[in-house]
Amino acid sequence: MENSFRSGYVALVGPPNAGKSTFLNGVLGEKVAIVSPKPGTTRTAITGIWTTDSAQVVFVDTPGIVASRGRMQRLLAEAAWAALASAHGAVVFLDGARYAARSSALVRDVHSFAPRLRQLGIPLAVAVNKIDQVAPKARLLAVLAACAKLWPGADIFPVSARTGEGRDRLEAAILAMVPEGPPLFPADQLSTAPLRFLAAEVVREQLFLQLHQELPYHVAVEVEEWAEEPGLTSIGVVIYVSKTSHKAMIIGRAGSRLKAVGQAARQALKELLGTKVHLSTWVKVREGWTEDEEFLREMNIGEVL
C-alpha cells in the first residue's frame, strides 16, 4: 500500500571515534549520546528514536568495535553484536579523515569485524564520515574504493556528521532499510535510556573532555541519589577510579578540576531535565574495576539501553 508507515531498528557500528554518536544527535536534533574527541567514549548501546511523518527508526548507537583487550572491551564488542542481531539494517561509520591520510589503517581497523558484517544478511550502508576535514576531496577516492571491496554491494555515503553534509542521502537509505509496520514508541520519545543513566553519562562526558591521556578510560560514573521537587532535581553522583593517584587527578588542586567538571555537567543536566539542578559529586577508588565483570554490568557497560 502506498504511503504505508515503516518502522524498525538500525544499528550504528564501526571503529571507535568514527562519529556514530554525533550522527545520531544530529538526526534527532537533540543530544541523547555523549561525544568527545577521545575514542572509546560510548560504553553502552543506547537507543535514539527518530520519528518522521512516514517512519520511525530506532537507532542503536553501539560502542566502537576493536579487537578485544580485557573484559570491558569484550563486553563492549558483545553489545555491538547484540544490537546487530536484532537490527533490520546497519550503518558502518568510518573516520574518512583518518583513512584519507593513512589508507592502510582502514583494513587494519575493520579486519576483525568486516567479514562478520558481510554475513549478517541485512541491508548495510557505509558512512565515510568527517569529509569536512579532508582537502582536497579527491583524497577520499581510495577510501571509497577500499570500502567497496570490503563490503561489496553496500551503498557508500561520504558524509560529515558534524556539519550535516551528505546526511540527507544517508537518511533516505536508512528509512528504506526498515520494514512496513506501526510505530514502536510514542512520536515524542527520543530514547529508551533512563534519565538516571543519561545523567551519569553527562558527568562522564565532562570527565572525558576535561581529563587527559588515558585517565578517562579508568573512570566510571553512577548516580546514587536522585530527588525531585518542583523546579529542582537533586542528583548525587559517584565517580569511580581504579587508582588512588587517579582520584587526586580528578579532584585537582584544591578541588578545582572536580568543580569545573561539576559546573559544566550541571549546566548540561539543566538543559536535559528542564529544571534547576543541584549536583553533588564524590570520587571513590575501586581497584581493578575494568576487569570486574559484575561491576561492569552494574555500570551498564556493554548493555543495550
Image (cartoon, rainbow, N blue to C red):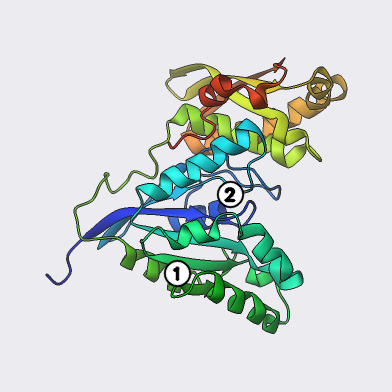
Q: Which residue type does callout 1 highlight? A: Leu
Q: For the residue carrying disc 1, how many other residues have a C-alpha within 10 Å: few (<14), some (14-19), or many (20+)?
A: some
The residues bearing labels 2 and 1 have C-alpha atoms spaced at a distance of 21 Å
Residue depicted at x 64% and y 71%: 131
Rendered view: 243 above or below 13 = above
- The label nearer to you, 2 versus 1, is 2
* 10, 204: nearer the viewer: 10
Q: Residue furthest left?
A: 1
Q: Which mark is residue 170?
A: 1
Secondary structure at badge 1 equals: helix
Q: Viewed as shown, does residue 189 lie left or right of 11? A: left
Please provide percent x and percent y for residue 81.
46, 46
Dot 2 corresponds to which residue? Answer: 65
Q: Which mark is residue 12?
A: none
Q: Which residue type does callout 2 highlight? A: Ile
Q: Viewed as shown, does residue 273 lie left or right of 257? A: left
* 271, 209: nearer the viewer: 209
Please provide percent x and percent y for residue 3.
17, 69
Quadrant in which the N terminus is drawn: bottom left
Please provide percent x and percent y for residue 162.
60, 62
Give the quadrant of residue 10.
bottom left
Residue depicted at x 55% and y 70%: 150
